[in-house]
Image (tube, rainbow, N blue to C red):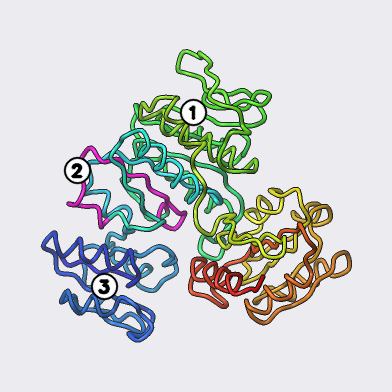
């Protein structure tokens, strides 16, 4: 086959390598220049033909086109491929065609990375052979031929990846929540919801889908499920996992209840992490992990990098890196997670952000706001009449100003509520920049 890969990022290069291993003729097209593409040299080393700085008609000389996450439907290669009836799939879909391992796929606007890592942690602690990847870490293409059929893949899946599937069928699918995000790519919130729902569209009767009963858009996915449905909730008692009093309760297929553990014993703080923990517990139960192993693992898990990550305490002020909060809803969870005054560093590239959802939390929990990035003016204007607000031109200035504004016992919370692409290449680079500055502070 002639296969074109659109995008020479990590997933695109891994898809290209997989296609080469399968014996296909591979061509890569990339919008960025060769100098801007970190993995360009790897393509050359592999002998893969590639073009940089835009796409030519050579990209359409293909039997199959594999698009990297985030390549929108309006991309010229995708639109012309549709006109010529060339099949277009994403790297997730392509890789899954060569994998026989059971897959736990986790999606949601927020909490995907934490729940993916937590689920893998539970499975690993229970003695299972497990890898994690997808939208986090390793693309699925890299697992083809390198893991056994008994290895469980815990896969974070984004709406971008799910938008381009046609047969991807995880053994366990999880939808944590759905709030407005990535509308520039999807066009409307309804299309974004439909992309999330695709995670269960090819499941079979004996597969399981796990849904947040407290999120109306996630819960409504049950209406299109062919698989067995389980729910999790902190508000109501459901078939799956729920909170009663101080305890997390699990229900079996025959409605038999089992108290799993007290909420206060969870290793991760905050109601959002109670949701994440219940989703991970149900995923593990679907793969027949014992309650004892689930309980021990939920207690021992300490979190993931860039998600409410405690960096350092300097002069009795705690510095917390929540760079993964790339939207308003994620920042809401972060702002609700502390019982101490917060100096909040926020900003980046907006996505039609509506900050009114944060007004109540800011009023009660936030001492001051340091505004950065392209959204600095919008954030400043939204709260400057009710809170102390300042603007910073760099990460180092933002941390310095926060240190000056914070009192002993406060939290300096870097939870941007925005994308990173104005100042950084991704949220990981942004989070590391914050941590580097914090580590340089003197006691």
Question: Quadrant of the rendered structure where residue 32 is?
Answer: bottom left
Residue drawn at x 80%, y 67% as measured from the top left: 382
| Span of residues in magenta | 141-162
Q: Is residue 403 left or right of residue 80?
A: right
Residue drawn at x 37%, y 55% as measured from the top left: 164
Q: Which mark is residue 230?
A: 1
The secondary structure type at the circle numbered 3 is helix
Kindly report which numbered mark, 1 or 2, lies closer to the viewer in this rendering.
Answer: 2
Q: Position of residue 51 (x, y in %)?
A: 27, 82
Are the residues flagged by discs 1 and 2 in contact, CB closer than 8 Å? no
Q: Which mark is residue 148?
A: 2
Instruction: Pick out the residue farthest to the front.
Output: 443
Q: Position of residue 374 (x, y in %)?
A: 65, 77
Q: CA distance from mark 2 to mark 3?
A: 35 Å
Question: Quadrant of the rendered structure where residue 2 is?
Answer: bottom left
Are the residues flagged by discs 3 and 1 in contact, CB closer than 8 Å? no
Is 337 one of the magenta-colored residues?
no
First in sequence: mark 1 vs mark 2: 2
Q: Position of residue 73 (x, y in %)?
A: 43, 65
The secondary structure type at the circle numbered 1 is strand
Q: Position of residue 242 (x, y in %)?
A: 59, 27
Image quarter of the N terminus? bottom left
Instruction: Pick out the residue farthest to the right.
Output: 385
Q: Is residue 257 above or below residue 200?
A: above
Q: CA distance from mark 1 to mark 2?
A: 28 Å
Kindly report which numbered mark, 2 or 3, lies closer to the viewer in this rendering.
Answer: 2
Is 150 one of the magenta-colored residues?
yes
First in sequence: mark 3 vs mark 1: 3
Q: Is residue 252 above or below residue 375?
A: above
Q: Which residue is mark 3?
A: 60
Image quarter of the C terminus? bottom right
Q: Which of these two is toward me, 348 or 180? A: 348
């Amino acid at each position: 086959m002639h296969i074109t890969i659109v995008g020479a990022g990590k997933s695109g290069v891994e898809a290209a390598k997989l296609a080469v291993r399968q014996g296909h003729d591979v061509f890569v097209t990339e919008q960025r220049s060769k100098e801007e593409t970190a993995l360009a040299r790897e393509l050359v080393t592999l002998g893969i033909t590639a073009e940089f700085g835009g796409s030519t008609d050579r990209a359409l000389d293909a039997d199959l086109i594999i698009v990297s996450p985030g390549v929108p439907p309006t991309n010229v290669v995708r639109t012309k491929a549709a006109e010529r009836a060339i099949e277009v799939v994403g790297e997730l879909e392509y890789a899954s065609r060569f994998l026989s391992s059971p897959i736990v796929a986790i999606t949601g606007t927020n909490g995907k990375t934490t729940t993916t890592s937590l689920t893998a942690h539970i499975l690993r602690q229970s003695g299972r052979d497990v890898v994690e990847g997808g939208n986090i870490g390793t693309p699925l293409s890299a697992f083809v031929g390198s893991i056994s059929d008994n290895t469980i893949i815990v896969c974070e899946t984004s709406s971008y990846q799910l938008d381009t599937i046609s047969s991807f069928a995880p053994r366990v699918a999880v939808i944590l929540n759905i709030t407005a995000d990535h509308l520039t790519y999807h066009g409307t919130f309804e299309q974004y919801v439909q992309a999330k729902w695709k995670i269960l569209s090819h499941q079979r009767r004996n597969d399981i889908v796990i849904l947040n009963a407290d999120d109306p858009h996630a819960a409504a996915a049950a209406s299109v499920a062919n698989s067995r449905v389980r729910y999790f909730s902190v508000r109501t008692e459901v078939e799956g996992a729920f909170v009663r009093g101080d305890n997390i309760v699990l229900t079996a297929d025959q409605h038999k209840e089992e108290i799993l553990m007290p909420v206060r014993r969870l290793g991760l703080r905050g109601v959002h992490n109670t949701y994440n923990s219940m989703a991970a517990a149900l995923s593990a139960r679907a793969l027949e992990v014992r309650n004892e192993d689930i309980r021990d693992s939920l207690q021992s898990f300490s979190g993931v990098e860039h998600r409410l990550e405690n960096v350092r305490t300097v002069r009795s002020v705690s510095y917390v890196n929540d760079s993964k909060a790339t939207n308003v809803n994620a920042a809401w969870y972060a702002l609700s997670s502390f019982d101490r005054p917060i100096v909040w560093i926020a900003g980046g590239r907006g996505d039609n952000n509506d900050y009114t959802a944060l007004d109540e939390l800011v009023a009660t929990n936030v001492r001051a706001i340091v505004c950065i990035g392209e959204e600095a003016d919008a954030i400043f204007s939204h709260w400057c009449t009710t809170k102390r607000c300042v603007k910073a031109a760099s990460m180092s200035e933002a941390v310095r100003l926060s240190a000056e504004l914070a009192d002993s016992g406060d939290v300096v919370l870097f939870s941007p509520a925005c994308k990173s692409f104005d100042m950084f290449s991704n949220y990981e680079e942004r989070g590391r920049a914050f941590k580097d500055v914090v580590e340089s502070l003197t006691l």
